Amino acid sequence: MNTAKHKLLQTWRWYGPIDPVSLQDVKQAGATGIVSALHHIPHGEIWPLEDIIERKAIIEAAGLTWAVVESVPVHEAIKTRRADADHYIENYRESLRNLAKCGIKTVCYNFMPVLDWTRTQLDLTMADGSKALYFNWLDLAVFDLFILKREGAGADYSDSLKDRAKERFATMNTDELNELKINVLMGIPNEKGIELEALRASIEEYKTIGREGLKKNLAYFLNGIADVCEETGINMTIHPDDPPYAILGLPRIVSTKEDLVDILRSVDKPFNGICYCTGSLGAGVSNNLPEIFEAVKERVYFLHLRNVTKDAEGNFYEADHLGGDVNMYEIMKAVTAENARRAEPIPFRPDHGHQMLDDLNKVTNPGYSAIGRLRGLAELRGLELGVTGNY
Ligand code: DNO
């Protein structure tokens, strides 16, 4: 049992005024912190101070606080270190300064090439009738080989998977193929998506960059914002790759314990931190989650608590928060012990949730409907209380 005076900070991702889940819903779910971003600002542009102030005021008027920004997106020009990378780093620095002026000091971002999180199905029906997000290699291979038609894709899959993909493709109609395409390319609500042609061009560009190049570009970015973070007290938290595997021939550098440790060492300063996401890391068949947390815990400034059930092939669906392969009891013990050492509570959010109950009849953002996350948050809050005895 630990004796922390503060609990973890219970937060909730809110996509802003366009989110079908209202701030009042969030309050009823019991969260006190909001995780939000200015999704209407195109990637790479400066976040204007007025827009940040406005969003903050909306959140505070509901009696909540804006605890974390997820995400200030890193422009592709920075990830690929194009000639104009420095211009975008300058913009990023300005956005960070503006956020700090409003007292917002925890920023989440990712360094996944081109695509943010990737799933092949958004409505896998669970035994209880709720719906979950799903990643399946066979469907990804169908997308890669027959929809994207990526050059050299064949080399990335086993012969048996390729045979099965061919058979499956032959049974799929136009609507099914279109749905698979939409699912794989799906981005963040209200942000600009990507088309097949642009994805092909990016894949080409990343071929020459590779894993080592991408690591260097990340370190260049972190060095480029370090002084602003140190002056303002901003902590950056990198989100792991989701899924934590190279997909579509794109390099991955945030998938394992070694990756995370490398990133912390590459720019060894406290501002350079991690968003510990048990769902993304948990999808890696070789990832040992408590061990990963132990290795990086001092620099974990944000937690995404979510569960996955995977099979031997590495396919996975998103399970109940206290179901699945991630031993959330062990995780909660570890994160609350770390929280007890901190001056400020570590924010966590119930990441994703099943579409269930009344939400099954509503248009919701995949993974971000209200009731599934409300259930997740309630379970996690109870688990924390049980683990710490901190009533
Ligand atoms: C998915 C999220 C990610 C995350 C970004 C961070 O549900 O966890 O989209 O926000 O990768 O930049």
Image (spheres, rainbow, N blue to C red):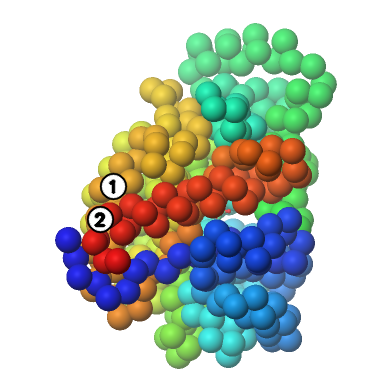
Between 46 and 311, the residue placed more toward the observer is 311
Q: Quadrant of residue 227?
A: bottom left
Under circle 1, the secondary element is helix
Kind of residue at disc 1: Tyr
Q: Residues within 10 Å of mark 2 (few under 14, many from 20)?
A: some
Looking at the image, is 214 positioned above or below residue 345? Answer: above
Q: Which mark is residue 387?
A: 2
Q: Residue beneath label 1, please? A: 329
Marks 1 and 2: CB-CB under 8 Å?
yes
**Residue 259 image position (x, y, % from top left):** 36, 53
Q: Quick check: 276 left or right of 171?
A: left
Which image quarter holds the C terminus?
Answer: bottom left
Q: Residue at x 48, y 31 (%)?
A: 316
**Residue 217 image position (x, y, % from top left):** 50, 63
Q: Residue at x 24, y 61 (%)?
A: 388
Distance between the alpha carbons at the discs numbered 1 and 2: 8 Å
Q: Residue at x 69, y 62 (%)?
A: 22
**Residue 212 image position (x, y, % from top left):** 43, 53
Camera-near label (1 vs 2) is 2
Give whichever of discs 1 and 2 has the lower sequence position: 1
**Residue 350 image position (x, y, % from top left):** 48, 54
